[in-house]
Amino acid sequence: MDFDKMFNAQLDALKDEGNYRIFAELERRCGDFPKAKSHDDDAPDEVTVWCSNDYLGMGQNPVVRERMKDVIDSCGTGAGGTRNISGTNHHHVELEAELADLHGKEDALLFTSGYVSNWAALSTLGSKLPDAVILSDSLNHASMIEGIRHSRARKVLWNHNDPEDLDRKLAALPANTPKIVAFESVYSMDGDICPMKEIVEVAEKHGAMTYLDEVHAVGLYGERGGGISEREGLADRITLIEGTLGKAYGCMGGYVSGSAALCDFIRSFASGFIFTTALPPAVAAAAKTSIAHLKRSQIERMQQRRQVARLRDRLDRYGIPHMDNPSHIIPVLIKDPVKCRMLADILMRDYGIYVQPINYPTVPKGTERLRFTPGPLHSDADIDHLVEALNVLWKQCAIAHAVA
Ligand SMILES: *Cc1c(COP(=O)(O)O)cnc(C)c1O
């Protein structure tokens, strides 16, 4: 059997569709974010990153960096084991307490990533609660979809951000079945925000538990960075809040928070928690420092909001259409995978602007886009440069301008 030939046939098909993924090889320049050195031959030496999930630049925060270095020196590099077998470090426990406090919950449980936390928590809940049914928003992230699939629980899809559809689907289930409503606060591809209060009320009406992914909201929304659930005053009505330490907090790791019994249940049964080496203690300590910082400091969030508003305003002035949403994510629809890739390539090569084209299967075919995430460290000049470049390309590519 010629396996490479089989691999290449499928890769070629991907390339023909324009959906083949090409990574930009960068060296982020600490102290100089969002600037990075590029290692690609057809890009300038220095580029500006416009699609980072290090939304607030916490990955270069001096206090967070010092903390990580200090704990490397005091505890060494790796955790040395799974949480059960010698890997639970004091810094993991402290971080879990910080996370529980962030969301006003009794407890929290750490994972090696947000992906793993969704996968492990949903597969455990769905498989260990007898006859559980998981009601999943139709645009949920791959990590939730895979967790639900792995649980083998019955899955019911409800229309994206549609509490009435959720209500109908919950009403059709037997009253005594355990029901789990899984959804996100900020959806990262369209940047839309769920109607959380309505969803919570519908779930409560049917006695369902709520499972909320706040990955694109923690650190960014709410007075203390507790996410949309904090901003809306709903955190205490959500059964489980899941988040990441790898995006706005600038480190790595994922978590769930909820009641002590819920966290103990997942700790005790989740394979993806039990059978893997714990996060490096230094990463846990740095994440805790980052969370604590963003509980107090509003500067990063305010400056991010300013730059997001500024980019939207400049795009409007040039008539470049972007999706209207209430978040920090600015998607510019291109609606064609090849054109999307081409635009991104030209932006990189001619302007030193790095924005990754977002193609299928991350988004549906025909909705290919460039997705910009302005942060507090993008200067006004960075924004002007980006909009002027887009304006030139818009004309060259003859993409229809927004109808004013
Ligand atoms: C990125 C992402 C995750 C996974 O988090 P990581 O820490 O990057 O593994 C989970 N949910 C959503 C909605 C995400 O966008």
Image (spheres, helix red, strand yellow):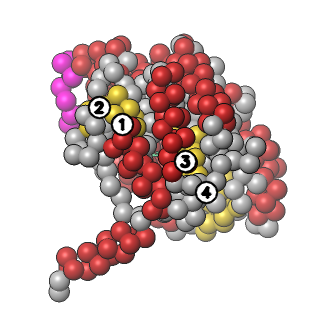
Q: Is residue 237 visible?
A: yes
From the viewer's perspective, is residue 51 above or below residue 361?
above
Residue annotated with mark 2: 46
Q: Residues within 10 Å of mark 2 (few under 14, many from 20)?
A: some
Q: Residue 394, labelled with which disc?
A: 3
Pointer 2 or 4: first along the chain: 2
Please tell me in which quadrant of the rendered image residue 287 appears. top left
State the SS at label 2.
strand
Badge number at residue 101: none
Pointer 1: what residue?
352
Please, what is the three-letter code of the amino acid marked with disc 3? Trp
Query: In the rendered image, is residue 100 in sight?
Result: no
Q: Earlier in the sequence, mark 3 or mark 2?
A: 2
* Residue 268 position within the rendered picture, expressed as x and y whole percent measured from the top left: 43, 47
Spatial CA distance of label 1 from label 3 is 17 Å
Residue under the point 48% across and 22% down: 381
Contact? badges 3 and 2 (CB < 8 Å): no
Of callouts 4 and 1, the N-terminal one:
4
Q: Which residue is mark 4?
A: 139
Q: Quadrant of the N terminus?
A: bottom left
Q: Is residue 202 left or right of residue 394?
A: right
Residue 86, given in percent of the width and then of the height, sits at 24, 36
Residue at the spot 65% in from the left edge and 56% down from the top edge:
137
Q: Nearer the viewer, residue 195 or 234?
A: 195
Which of the marked residues, 1 or 2, is nearer the chain's N terminus? 2
Asked which quadrant contains residue 81, the reply is top left
The image shows residue 206, relative to residue 287, as above or below, that is below
Label 4–label 1 contact, CB within 8 A: no
Q: Counting other residues with Cα less than 10 Å from the Cα at mark 3, is it few (<14), some (14-19), or many (20 or more)? A: some
**Which residue type does callout 4 highlight?**
Leu
